[in-house]
Amino acid sequence: MLEYCSTRRKKSNPINVNFSHAILNPIAEYGGLYAPSEIPLFSENCLNSMISLSYDELAIYILNKFGVDIPNEVIQNSLQCYDLFDYSYNPVPIVKLYENIYVAELWHGPTRSFKDMALQAFPYLLSNLATKFDKKYIIAVATSGDTGPAALEGFKDLPSTKIICYYPLEGTSSIQAEQMQKAQGANTKVFGVNTDFDGLQKELKDMLKSSTINEYLKYKGYELSAANSVNFGRIVFQVVYHFCSYFKMLKLKELKFGDSIDYIIPSGNFGNALAAFYAKMMGLPIGKIILASNENNILSDFVNRGIYDLTKRNIKKTIAPAMDILISSNIERLLFHLFGDERTFELMKNLDEKKYFELNFNEMKVIQYIFSADYATEDEIRSTIKNVYYSYNYLIDPHTATAFVVRDKCELSYKSVIFSTAEWTKFPELIADVFNCGSSFNSIRDKLRVDIPFQIKNLQDLDIIHSSIINSFDMKKVLLEFCNE
């Protein structure tokens, strides 16, 4: 069965672990992340046989190939979460906007973002494992806006778990913050933090690695894990919808089997793009994986110049806040698969200590063979939201807008799928500003003739439960206090 190993190594004989260990303990040797020791490969015949599978059947098949050492019955139970999506039989609809322009809508779950695709299923697996091993887990989450609401909903009242969520106080939309502040569940705790997402993510990784914190939690009867995409349990569920999207294009007769198609992916922490990379390496006929960023364009620099440079950069607060990230954690897994664990150790050591690393020429060409990248300015995002609506009667959020901008910049004239990562309802103030209408949902609905999903309507009737605000140096303190409640 496929095993998992650390992305970083500086000695022989790496320690391999099973999937269960990797998701319960997401930080590996030398501060690395767990990644599959090899990427499973599907033959053409195998891919052809997968086309007719339902989404649940496809998920079970792919998870088994990734060595998920959990009974199929448990996996099947976790996938029942998709029954609560807008279309239980079709959790990822494909919309054809125009000739050669297709959109995979990933946001039909309870919190209206693509994070629901993994974070409504994955928590059930972790909770099941915790109960199986007679352990209790505190799940820590750092969010740039969408992971938090999805994780809080996914772990809500699950046995053997508590979840603590940290969000950047001025770094999310009002609806994203409201979703977290009003999160239900007796096992949830949420804090707004006076820092940016990179600050949150650094503190989270430090807590996961801290022997002092982990020993104290064990003394109190808890283990510590994470729901961020540092946890491979997130990534494996995301691989599924990349296969599903291609197969759906075949069923719609928009592709012939074996035809290549480009995927355009709004990218912040690189988890969604990494899942597309796995799908491509497994044999799915993806052409280029095209990364779309906002003005925090660290990923386009990485792809186009082979440089990851944090020395003179600070996070810009933008109207696409889920991408206000400079340290994209999942780049580490990509480096591991392409260049090996020793080279990854060297590059990540440079990034940790010098805030900089640079690929050599051959490494950069390998990256550019698989990926392209560009970014959208604030003005481009605004104008694109307006243009897409008036051209196609289709309302998009600012992150999806970056993908439309980059598609135009890349001058793609052939078929491509844009992965829409959030519903417009997460950003009502921006939509109201772009279209010059009142910021209430009713005003937007009346002017643009769009529906408001019940999940957003119901949110307005809930009370704020979590209103605490802390500084980043208090994140460890409130975590430890949480285990005593």
Image: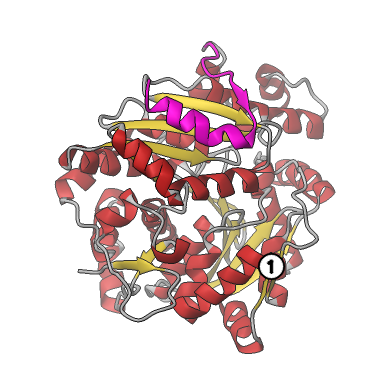
In the image, 452 versus 135, the foreground residue is: 135
Name the secondary structure under disc 1: helix
Callout 1 environment at 10 Å: few (<14), some (14 to 19), or many (20+)?
few
Taking depth in this image into account, of 200 and 99 the one nearest to the observer is 200
Residue 346: where, in percent of width, then height?
A: 55, 76
Residue drawn at x 27%, y 38% is 127
Asked where in the image residue 485 lies, by quadrant, the reply is top left
Any magenta on residue 473?
yes
- Find disc 1 in the rendering and name its residue: 354
Vertical side of 29 occupied by 346: above or below: below
In the image, 242: left or right of 72?
Answer: right
Q: Residue 237, position in %: x, y? A: 37, 52
> Toward the viewer: 392 or 225?
225
Q: Amino acid at mark 1?
A: Lys
Q: Quadrant of the N terminus?
A: bottom left
Give the extent of the magenta segment.
463-485
